[in-house]
C-alpha cells in the first residue's frame, strides 16, 4: 500500500517548504494545492479555478496513491472542508498528518512574502485580514483524522528536527 503524508496548517505556517523538504528526504513528490492553483490561474482563470484546483488536486493524489506512489500532500486542510475528500484515500494509502505551527507574527510575515510573489492566490486579501486580527488563525479547524499525527513548530527551523519528521513519515 502507498503512503500519503499530509502537511497541514493555516497560511504562513511553513507547510509548502516543509512538504518539499520532506518529499526530497523521502524520495517522492510533494503535491501542493496552491502550486496547482497558481499554475491553473496562469493558464486559464475563468472564475472556476478554485473548484477545478480541488478536483485536480484530489484526482492527482488518487491516481498516484492507487498506483502505489508515496506522496506528500500539502494544503491548508481544514477538517470540515477537507476530511470528506481525504477519507476515501485511506482505501489506497496509509495516511499520516504533519501539523505545522508558528506564531501569528511569523505567519503574517510569510503571508506578506507570498503576496509579493504569487499572483493568483488571495494572499493580499488574507494579509489584510490577518493584519486586523488573529481570527483566521484562531478559527482554523485542524484535521482530526484518526491517523498518526505529529506537530511541528516551523517558526525557526523545525521542532522536532527534520530527521525526526522524516522518521515519523516512514523514511527511517
Image: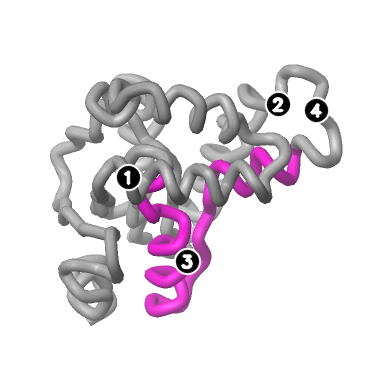
Which residue matches tag 2?
49
Which residue matches tag 1?
105
Density class for disc 1 (Cα within 10 Å; few <14, some 14-19, many ≥20) is some
* Camera-side residue of 17 and 98: 17
Q: Quadrant of residue 78?
A: top left
- Lower sequence index among marks 2 and 1: 2
Taking the image as drawn, is residue 83 in sight? no
Instruction: Classify mark 3: helix, strand or loop.
Output: helix
Density class for disc 2 (Cα within 10 Å; few <14, some 14-19, many ≥20) is some
Which residue: 63% across, 35% down? 121
- Residues at discs 3 and 2 in contact (Cβ within 8 Å): no
- Residues at discs 4 and 2 in contact (Cβ within 8 Å): yes
| Quarter occupied by the C terminus | bottom left
Would you place residue 65 above or below residue 138 in this image? below
Q: Nearer the viewer, mark 2 or mark 1?
A: 1
Task: Tell me the CA gap for discs 3 and 2.
Answer: 24 Å
Q: Residue 28 location, x and y as percent?
A: 48, 71
Density class for disc 4 (Cα within 10 Å; few <14, some 14-19, many ≥20) is some
Which residue matches tag 4?
45
Which residue: 65% across, 38% down? 37
Magenta residues, as a range?
Answer: 12-40
Taking the image as drawn, is residue 24 in sight? yes
Amino acid at each position: 500500500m502507498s503512503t500519503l503524508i499530509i502537511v497541514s496548517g493555516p497560511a504562513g505556517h511553513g507547510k509548502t517548504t516543509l512538504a518539499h523538504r520532506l518529499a526530497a528526504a523521502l524520495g517522492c513528490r510533494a503535491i501542493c494545492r496552491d502550486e496547482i492553483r497558481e499554475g491553473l490561474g496562469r493558464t486559464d482563470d475563468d472564475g472556476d479555478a478554485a473548484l477545478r484546483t480541488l478536483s485536480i488536486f484530489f484526482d492527482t493524489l488518487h491516481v498516484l496513491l492507487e498506483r502505489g506512489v508515496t506522496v506528500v500532500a500539502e494544503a491548508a486542510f481544514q477538517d470540515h472542508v477537507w476530511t470528506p475528500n481525504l477519507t476515501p484515500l485511506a482505501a489506497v494509502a496509509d495516511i499520516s498528518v504533519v501539523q505545522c505551527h508558528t506564531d501569528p507574527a511569523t505567519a503574517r510575515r510569510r503571508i506578506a512574502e507570498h503576496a509579493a510573489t504569487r499572483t493568483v492566490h488571495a494572499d493580499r486579501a488574507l494579509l489584510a485580514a490577518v493584519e486586523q486580527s488573529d481570527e483566521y488563525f484562531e478559527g482554523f479547524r485542524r484535521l482530526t483524522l484518526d491517523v498518526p499525527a505529529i506537530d511541528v513548530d516551523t517558526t525557526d527551523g523545525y521542532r522536532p528536527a527534520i530527521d525526526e519528521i522524516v522518521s515519523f513519515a516512514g523514511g527511517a
